[in-house]
Image: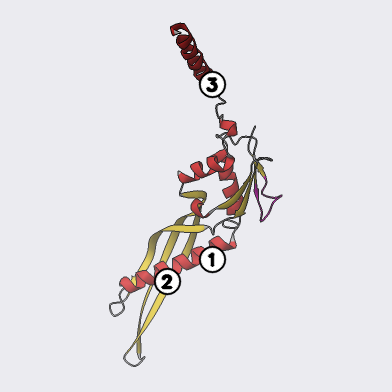
Amino acid sequence: MKQIIIGLTIGVLSMLVYNQYTKPIESASEIKGSQIIQEQLKNVSKLVVTEGFFSDVITYKDVKSLYMDLLSAEKKAVVLVRAKATISYDLHQLEFNVDELNKIIMVSNIPEPELQINPKLTYYDLQQEYLNPFNASDYNKISNLVNKRLKNQIYASEFVSNSKNRLLSELHGLFGNTPLKGWTIISIEEPYKNMLFLDE
């Protein structure tokens, strides 16, 4: 009887050990693509996709009328503008669907690009009269004028319009070193233009 109990115990333990080591282990390729994407996006809140440099020269002039318009006092400045501009996206707002069977990441909604401008102003030929000196209000006006002109210049270029393509390229880089190799990223807005393949 003792030998039977020992035999049964050994048999049960053998089965448990066999089941433990023959149990299929979830490989990286079997992990759902959506899980990998969510994990990668969790680590990146904002993704800067484009960086550029812009320059401009602005002439600022202000004339102050005095004594019932009998006299006037003028001030003016030439301002050299150098600015660094970046386009970023909030990846928490990125909407996508994952086709596990066909290995496709379908981007259904791209959030609005966020434009950040950091101008550096250098003042040349600063002229002012005693009755109309430069003050904080003038520098605020110049700053607002600079930002407005830079935005017009940037939006007139392809800097912003190309940012969606750059976003998809950056996503390619973000997912390229994961088990998503061999997958395809497609934007629904421009499915053929923006198709990118993650390298095998």
Q: Along the polypeptide, which appears first: circle 2 or circle 1? A: 2
Part of the protein shown in magenta? 186-195
Q: CA distance from mark 2 to mark 1?
A: 18 Å
Q: Does residue 31 sit above or below 57 in this rendering?
A: above
Give the residue at mark 2: 60
Which label sits on residue 124?
A: none
* Residue furthest bottom in the image: 68
Q: Does residue 158 sit above or below 40 in this rendering?
A: below
Q: Along the polypeptide, which appears first: circle 3 or circle 1? A: 3
- Describe residue 142's horizontal placement relative to residue 152 as left or right: left
User: Which is in the foreground here, disc 3 or disc 1?
Assistant: 3
**Residue at 40% over, 60% down:** 121
Q: Secondary structure at mark 1?
A: helix
Q: Does residue 28 sit above or below 101 in this rendering?
A: above
Pick the front one: 67 or 150: 150
> Do callouts 3 and 1 mark residues in contact (Cβ within 8 Å)?
no
**Residue at 50% over, 56% down:** 54
Give the residue at mark 1: 152
| Residue 136, quarter of the rendered image | bottom left
| Residue 32, quarter of the rendered image | top right
Q: Secondary structure at mark 2?
A: strand
User: Which is in the foreground here, disc 2 or disc 1?
Assistant: 1
Q: Position of residue 118 (x, y in %)?
A: 42, 57
Pick the front one: 31 or 150: 31
- Name the kind of residue labelled 1 in the image: Asn
Q: Does the segment drawn in magenta span residue 76?
A: no
- Name the kind of residue labelled 3 in the image: Asn
- Name the kind of residue labelled 2 in the image: Tyr
Q: Callout 1: few (<14), some (14-19), or many (20+) C-alpha neighbours within 10 Å?
A: few
Give the residue at mark 3: 19
